[in-house]
Image: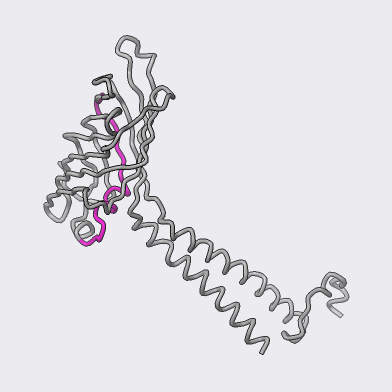
Amino acid sequence: MDMLFHGSRSYLATALASLAIAALSPALAQASEIAFTFTGYVEDPNNPFSNTPFAVSFDVNTLDPANTLTDTFEGGFLQTVSINVFATDFNATLGGVPVAINAPGGLTLLGVNPVNTGTATFFGPAIGFGGTGFNVEDTPHFGLATASQAAIQGSSDPLGLLLSGFSAGSDDPGLLFTSAGLLSSDVIFVGTAAAVPEPGIFGLLLLGFFGLIIVGPLTKRRRACANYSVPHENCDLSFLKLQTPKENES
């Protein structure tokens, strides 16, 4: 009976760990929260060696019904794309000093894929990010996660799919607007994005670690008992600390 109890407990722990690990990958891939980060600098036209750095970060819920996605396809691939998403949790600094960004704000992308061979690289007419008080506009190139028509139209969260692989970089200096109006027309930046794990994923991780913690000691105990030919229900490995390898062999 004790052997059955220990075996069932080990099996349950293994199952819990496997379940958590199996559930983790798709959950990460389908996260609806995307975190964006843009970093760059504002060039001083009078002094090219005196540039002011800036950084902007915000989160986007790709399932927000206020977001919009307009796309066209050719030959099974994304050819033009227009994305407008609303953002939260704005953080911005200019020259290391925090800058207040007021809602509404977010990210706007307008792009064309001139190659149309499956590459997910697009060229502006426009990209804009930020909000009232700090907003950058430019005509850069940007990348998305995929250009596959089948993948995009088959996804339950096409914005999340596309934006999870977002990256951007300035081709020409852009514009920076603050609450005082146009601050500079010489802005260079790069931008990246990453899916934010859903809160439930951390629970799955804890569940998996809990299972592994149980599995390890139980497996070690069973193997040790088998090596010493001790019946499982009577196995007490505390005697191992008192015996030397030579005594064990005898």
Q: Quarter of the image containing the N terminus?
A: bottom right
Q: Position of residue 20 (x, y in %)?
A: 48, 66
The answer to whether 232 is drawn above or below residue 16 in the figure is: below
Q: Eyeballing the image, is 126 above or below 73?
A: above
132 magenta-colored:
no
Residue 218 figure quarter: bottom right
- At 35% from the left edge and 50% from the top edge, which residue is drawn? 33
Q: Which residues are magenta?
A: 154-174
| Residue at the limit of the structure toward the top, as seen here | 46
> Residue 15 appears at what percent x and percent y?
51, 74
Residue 45 lies in what quarter of the image? Answer: top left
For image coordinates 38% across by 20% down, the residue present is 52
**Horizontal arrangement in the rendering, residue 76 relative to residue 227 (left or right):** left
Residue drawn at the location 15% of the way across and 41% of the way down: 114
Residues 235 and 1: in front is 1
> Residue 232's spot in the image, x, y percent?
72, 84
Left or right: 53, with 168 as reference point: right
> In the current view of this chain or complex, which residue is farthest to the bottom?
1
Image point (53%, 62%), residue name: 206
Check the image and tell me how it is coloured: one colour
Residue 82 is left or right of residue 201, and the answer is left
The C terminus sits in image quarter: bottom right
Q: How many marks?
A: 0
Question: From the viewer's perspective, is residue 199 above or below residue 184?
Answer: below
Nearest the camera: 122 or 14? 14
**Residue 47: horizontal and vertical position, in percent?**
35, 10
Reply above or below: 85 against 188: below
